[in-house]
Image (spheres, helix red, strand yellow):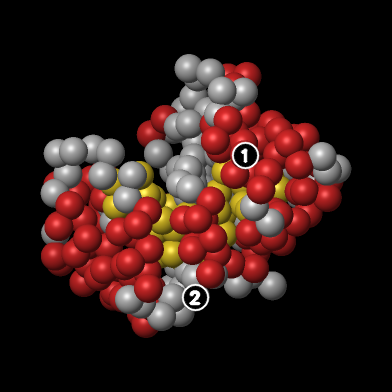
Amino acid sequence: MVLFDTHCHLDVDEFAADRDDVLTEARRVGVRDILVPGVSQAGWSALRTFCEPDPHLHAALGLHPVYLDQHRPAHVDGLAREVAADPPLAIGEIGLDYHLRDLDRAHQRDLLDAQLAIAADAGLPVVLHCRKAHDDMLQHLRRHALCGGFCHAFNGSLVQAERYLALGFCLGFGGMLTFERSTHLRALATALPIDVIVLETDAPDMTVASHRYQRNSPAYLPEILHTLAQLRGRDAAEVAAQTTANARRVLMLA
């Protein structure tokens, strides 16, 4: 089986001591490709340097809403220059986070719109972070001629999911799917068409049930795969092939 982890922060400090070992183990269990989203301008250069030598490590560049206090207007201009000079595979991780009440929502929306405009102009997919803000997110997406992307860690309603699909997005499912108590998430993963689902770990966060309270790893992606296959009553190899194809389609990889 060949798997694609569509959301993994393998570049962060939590992996500094054993990053190569983590990547080797992920590859051993079938995780060939990994999309590594950027979250702030300060990290873009190191992220690109990390990904460039390996054709199966893919950089995305973005300004994450959770780090709103770190972002400046010049960083948006810097993103536009980066994209013009050397386009990443996607723009992200970008979005809206209404779960954290201290984050200025108007500022978040302005930052999101600016980055969606860059993605639309460049014809690049986007990687979305969205917590308790799906209706607002969908409104912003409709304002831009986007080529789709991933809604990371989707946990909205089925109606909201269908609206993302109509805009060309795939929906990411990760470690929370492996917890039996995640009944809403499991119902979504069962009801949605298989050709709009992608797998992700969000490592080092949001780990799988078997490694609860531990650092997450891209090597745990097969546990998410097997949970999804079991929920849908399908062969794991078939689900692996389809979710990998979905990821490659959105990212326009041959």
| Residue bearing mark 1 | 187
- Give x and y (percent) for residue 147: 49, 75
Residue for point 48% across, 17% down: 213
Q: Is residue 50 visible?
A: no
Q: Which amino acid type is marked by label 2? A: Cys
| Residue bearing mark 2 | 147
Q: Which amino acid type is marked by label 1? A: Ala
Question: Could you say which quadrant of the image residue 76 lies in?
Answer: bottom left
Q: Residues within 10 Å of mark 1 (few under 14, many from 20)?
A: some
- Give x and y (percent) for residue 238: 83, 50
Residue for point 44% across, 64% down: 126
Question: Could you say which quadrant of the image residue 247 lies in?
Answer: bottom right
Q: CA distance from mark 2 to mark 1?
A: 27 Å
Residue for point 64% across, 52% down: 192
Position of 137 compared to 25: left or right? left
- Secondary structure type for disc 1: helix
Query: Which numbered mark, 2 or 1, is in the foreground of this view?
Result: 1
